[in-house]
Amino acid sequence: MDYRLLGNSGTSVSTLTLGTMTFGSEADEPTSHAMIDAFVEAGGTLIDTADVYSGNESERIIGRWLADHPTEAQQVVIATKGRFPQGDGPNDVGLSRRHLARALDASLDRLGVETIDLYQMHAWDALTPIEETLRFLDDAVSAGKIGSYGFSNYLGYQITKAVYEAKAHGWAPPVTLQPQYNLLVRDIEHEVVPACLDAGIGLLPWSPLAGGWLSGKYQRDQAPTGATRLGENPQRGMEAWEARNNDERTWAVLDAVSAAADAHEASRSQVALAWLLAQSAVTSVILGARTVEQLRDNLGAADLVLGADELAALDKASAPRIDDYPYGTAGVAQRERKITGGR
């Protein structure tokens, strides 16, 4: 396992992160604890959760593991999130000081720790002034309740606004962003990735296997049935499945993944994860497994290094569509005219 700095902080974390959204739902507590054991044994250090995962149970399961493993817990970096409803009241949601203060204390209690290493805003809040959120986070850092903070599912302008508001007030800066990012979903490269690179913010991609598509789980024109990532109801999410199934780009990407996997005698999942690890803005990739076997396979990506030709083939097959202004041909033409002095 390799290690990288957590964005622009001085904290070192493993390049693979244990995501725990399945804890307490798709994975019971013994299975969840076995996954943490396997992850730590492989050299993993960053464990990511959220207060809404499995109705708070994910944090409790992690907290009980930490209590039972005091020595190993010293090396673990804990990340959680706040923002979504924790009650029925009007102030039980959002990024206000009132809600975050209660949500943070509740997460600290469930995890059984004095400090959360990385506290993340789970999504943008258009109602709360960003200064209120950032001032709370700076106060939480000063109080020792959190080590650093980051965001999840933010747009490029939202990231940049937060970065410069924090800088203007002398508050602690954000260090990470959790976006959806994988070989089938690369749209963040238009604005979000440049904003993060500009600010020194590290990416922690979620859904690195695109809901199982990049693992080879789905076959062309064979609709999923029964218990899948789409749920127990085979009709749930079928519209999204059909859109991806009918997109030739999907199968071009899967062909490129399969070719690299065959060349390395690796799994498709490992190739998809290794591609993400090769992206310059990525700090650590979040693994979301339901079983220890799935997790062990994913952990194999830590030892897989793709060649330049393989990365180029994957890049070409998965290139994000940029047909429209300002990113497509019209935008390129305008930038070229500007460079040459035209309009």
Image: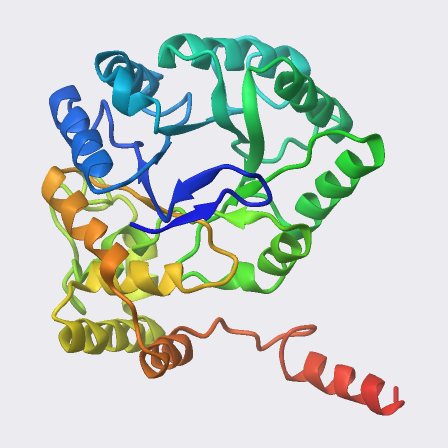
Q: Residue at x 45, y 75 (%)?
A: 319
Q: Residue at x 31, y 79 (%)?
A: 310
Q: Is residue 44 above or below residue 200?
A: above
Left/right placement of residue 56 relative to residue 129 reads left
Nearest to the observer: residue 101 or residue 343: 101
Nearest to the observer: residue 200 or residue 123: 200
Q: Residue at x 76, y 87 (%)?
A: 336
- Give the image location of residue 174, x and y in percent: 63, 37
Left/right placement of residue 223 relative to residue 150 reads left
Q: Quadrant of residue 311?
A: bottom left
- Give the image location of residue 196, x and y in percent: 61, 52
Q: Quadrant of residue 242?
A: bottom left
Residue 61 in view, yes or no: no
Residue 92 in view, yes or no: yes
- Give the image location of residue 188, x and y in percent: 54, 58
Q: Quadrant of residue 131?
A: top right
- Give the image location of residue 33, x and y in percent: 18, 25
Q: How is the image coloured?
A: rainbow
Nearest to the observer: residue 244 or residue 164: 164
Q: Is residue 90 above or below residue 303?
A: above
User: How many numbered discs, if any?
Assistant: 0
Q: Is residue 320 above or below residue 88?
A: below
Left/right placement of residue 169 relative to residue 172 reads right
Q: Residue at x 66, y 17 (%)?
A: 142
Quadrant showing the C terminus: bottom right
